[in-house]
Image (cartoon, grey):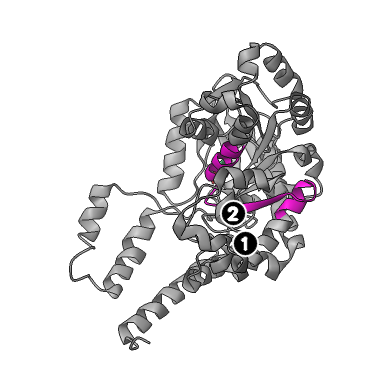
Amino acid sequence: MHNVDLDLVEMSLDVIKYAIARISDTDPKLGFPKTAEELKALVGETVTPAGIGGEKAFALFRDVLVKASVSIDHPRHLAFVPASPTRAAVMFDLVTSATSVHGAFWLEGAGCIFAENQAMEWLVSLTGMPEGTFGVFTSGGTEANLSAMVTAREYWRSQDDRRANQRGIVITSNGAHSSIKAMAKVIDADVLLVETEDRFEGGILAETIANMTPDDRQRIFAVIATGGTTNAGIIDDLAGIAAVCEAEKIWFHVDAAYGGGALAVRSVRHLFNGIEKADSVTIDPHKWLFSPYDCGAVIYRDPNLAKKAHGQEGSYLDIFSDEGARGFNPSDYQIQLTRRVRGLPLWFSLAMHGTDRYETAIERGIELAQIAGRLISETDYTELVREPSLSCVLFRRLGWSPEDYRAWTYDNHKSGFALVAPTKTRAGGETVSRFCFINPDTTEKDIADILATMA
Ligand SMILES: *Cc1c(COP(=O)(O)O)cnc(C)c1O
């Protein structure tokens, strides 16, 4: 037992008070970056042999550092994929840290991993994948995609000894997220990008495979479709692609990192038909399932294949496979060993609110995209690039150059009003503007006010 240090008690109270105030703040400051030089001038040297004390460090954080960081849950932050963690999940994130549980092995984390797994069961149920399907929480979609690709590649190699020294090929479309190409580099695999203007469909996949040499064909270890592209919310032809993968006996991965939350929404669930045929699926709870960072998930039809690819061995780890320690070891199913039980905040929030409230909150993002589509069409200086899909809206300001979009983005961000970033269309590479809705507290007025700044 340590002595109670009054300074520590006071610091703890300040920190908790700050956290409560922050999650109760319905109008958080948007925040704007400063350069490292500017921050150094304001903050000075903070890590010193004697320490600068909690009060001073916390004041620097509150008054300088956090103001130079963007609040991703701001209701007018509609750039990239924003976030909107529930208060319950954020508070439980603090509890997760305070509880100090190692989340790699059942022996150490049984109770907490059990809770994570109940949240995972719900995620798995949304996919409609068969009995035996299960998954694990990861640091994000990138790690989930990497873990699935390693599992697919190892499975492909297990089928033919000659593949031990062969580079595999993964087929995906130009609408896929950047992490697919980046993770293919990590595992030294080739990427065959199918060029599509809109959905990646079964027909073009079949054609692409038919045009490959027999030697290249047998190097295909996975096909990756996207369940909600990050740029435009486009859901690939999952059923068509699944059928081709089934016929060709190729691993089928669905990257639903952004769009996966919409699986919970009855009105759009049919757009994902075919996902139940996947061998693996990525969903990011830290995007559209209101979890704080960082929380992704990877789901496998046959978790044993993931275990073969990812299980780590070492004399110091033997105890974890002992009879007395039997249970689900999250480290067996993805690339990370030591991990926080990062699914706990999602579990607590799901348990507290119930899944119906999740459906309503996710559906609000889709409604906001429809509302934005209407407002854009009604405004005489803006027009839609394509119909809104899921919660993404691509639109143009008539007569604007790329430089105009850029300047407008900076003006709105600097003034603390809104963060809406430009992007490019897949076909043509035209610079346009884009909304992505996650936060159910964004209002129609927010959207109208943002459009008014384009006048
Ligand atoms: C965001 C995203 C990723 C990457 O996920 P991180 O959590 O940022 O690592 C991968 N795929 C898609 C479709 C995404 O939208």
Q: Quadrant of residue 59?
A: bottom left
Label count reads 2
Amino acid at the residue labelled 2 = Phe
Tell me the magenta residue range: 123-151
* Residue 27 seen in the figure: no
Which image quarter is the N terminus in?
Answer: bottom left
Residue 107 pos. (x, y %): 56, 67
SS class of the residue under badge 2?
Answer: strand
* Residue 435 seen in the figure: yes
Amino acid at the residue labelled 1 = Leu
Pointer 2 residue = 137
Residue plotted at (78% across, 25% down) = 247
Residue 258 pos. (x, y %): 62, 44
Q: Which mark is residue 209?
A: none
Q: Which mark is residue 346?
A: 1
**Magenta stretch: residue 132 in it?**
yes
**Horizontal side of residue 39 vs 330, given as left or right:** left
Residue plotted at (76% across, 25% down) = 244
Q: Residues within 10 Å of mark 2 (few under 14, many from 20)?
A: many
Residue 275 pos. (x, y %): 75, 39
Q: Quadrant of residue 355?
A: bottom right
